[in-house]
Every structure is written in C-alpha cells, then in structure tokens.
Image (cartoon, rainbow, N blue to C red):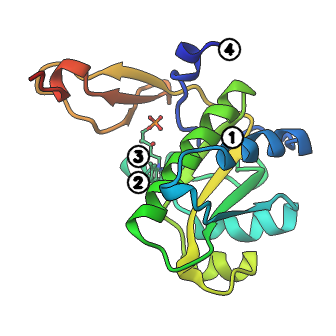
Amino acid sequence: MDFQEILLRRTIRRFQQKPLSEADFRALLNAARLASCASNRQRLRYIVAREPGRVAAILPHTAYAALVKPHRDPVPGVNSPVAFIAVTATEEPSSHLYADAGAAIQSLEFAAWERSIGCCWLASFDREKAAALLEVKDADRLLYLVALGYPAESPVREDIRGDGSPRYYLDSDDVLHVPKWTVDSITEWK
Ligand SMILES: Cc1cc2nc3c(=O)[nH]c(=O)nc-3n(C[C@H](O)[C@H](O)[C@H](O)COP(=O)(O)O)c2cc1C
C-alpha cells in the first residue's frame, strides 16, 4: 500500500468479530514506539487488552461518534471492537506527553490501515473504570484508548466546499461522511 492509500485511512467504529493476530498487534506497537517524541524520552507505555472478557468489560465505558449518536454505538459481539490498546504515561501527563501520544497513535493507525485493520482513537471513556479494568494504578496516566478490529464499515472523506461544516454525518445508506477542509481553506502562504 503506498502512502497516498494510507492517507485514505478513516476512523472505524464498526468491526468484524474476527481476532487480530499477535503479529498484527506487534506491527502496530512497533509503529507506535518508533514515532517522534519530545527529547526522545519515550515515556509512553502500552497495554493490549485482547482477552474477550476484558474487552467486553471495557466496552461499556467507552463512547463513540457523539455527532451521530447512537448510530455508531457498538453492539457487543456483533460489531464491537475486538481489542483495545491503552496508551499510558510513565509520569504525570504534560502537553508534550499528549503530543507524543498523538504522534504514536497516528503511526499506529497508519500501520493498522496498511494491514486492513480499523481503529478508533478514544478520548471519551470513563478513565477511572477503564484504568481499574486495565490495572493502571494512576488513572490520570491513562491517556487514550484505541479500539481495534477489522472494519465492518467504509466511511468516506469529502472536501468541505464553501461555507460547509466539518461535522461528520450519516447518509441514508448509513455511510459515514467525514468532511475535511481543503488545503487552500486552511493555509496562508507568506
Ligand atoms: C484526540 C482524539 C480523540 C478522539 N476521541 C474519540 C472518541 O472518544 N470517540 C470516537 O468515536 N472518536 C474519537 N476520535 C475520532 C474522531 O472523531 C475522528 O478522528 C474524526 O471524526 C475524523 O475522522 P477520521 O479519523 O476518519 O479522519 C478521536 C480522535 C482524536 C484525534
């Protein structure tokens, strides 16, 4: 897959109920660990939650696609994530640590897309409950979750025209449309 195809990546919130392999997880984590990070300090750590009971326990504490709620709420065992990767910090989070996590998750998402795996980066979840289920002692250090699985939906990107809106929406066929500003609408050349 070339880079232009990888850039077609979209957030996926409906998943096939097919497990990911150890090699898949390792490829994603390898991409994450090689990402840019402040001063190369590498203060992120990862937890792979893939045991079905643990994934099912975490699921109710995660939230999906607020703009089209409840249409992307996962149905457990039907289209729900098959795993979560938790991104944690080895020290109190700072803006640099959140930036590190962003770079790592973006790389992880690209590596996933290359392997035809879908991801949903999650900031909306019950941190205390998820931390307890993942055995993370300090919930503040649980920065993000990434929901994972093979896609069972095909969202489409479209460019925002004129005074359009970046709000994603579902069409009458239940396809998610993700509007993005064009380069010219967000760039000043000086
Ligand atoms: C920091 C961050 C937090 C996010 N949190 C959530 C979340 O809690 N739930 C969710 O469904 N999507 C979440 N997303 C996914 C965004 O909604 C998604 O990236 C956005 O709608 C654009 O879609 P795209 O990834 O297909 O370009 C998050 C994305 C980012 C970068």
The label number, if any, that marks residue 1 in the structure image: 4
Q: Which residue is mark 2?
A: 66
**For residue 93, side relative to residue 88 (left or right):** left
**Quick one: label 1, few (<14), some, or many (20+) residues within 10 Å?**
some
Q: Which residue is mark 1?
A: 31
* Residue 2 in view in this figure: yes
Q: Are marks 2 and 3 in contact (CB under 8 Å)?
A: yes
Task: Give whichever of discs 1 and 3 has the lower sequence position.
Answer: 1
- Distance (Cα) linking label 1 and label 3: 31 Å
Q: Are marks 1 and 3 in contact (CB under 8 Å)?
A: no
* Residue 152 in view in this figure: no
Q: Which residue is mark 3?
A: 68
- Distance (Cα) linking label 2 and label 1: 28 Å
Task: Give whichever of discs 2 and 1 has the lower sequence position.
Answer: 1
The label number, if any, that marks residue 80 in the structure image: none
| Residue 181 occupies quadrant | top left
**Residue at 66% across, 36% down:** 118
Q: Residue type at mark 4?
A: Met
Query: Under tag 1, what secondary structure?
Result: helix
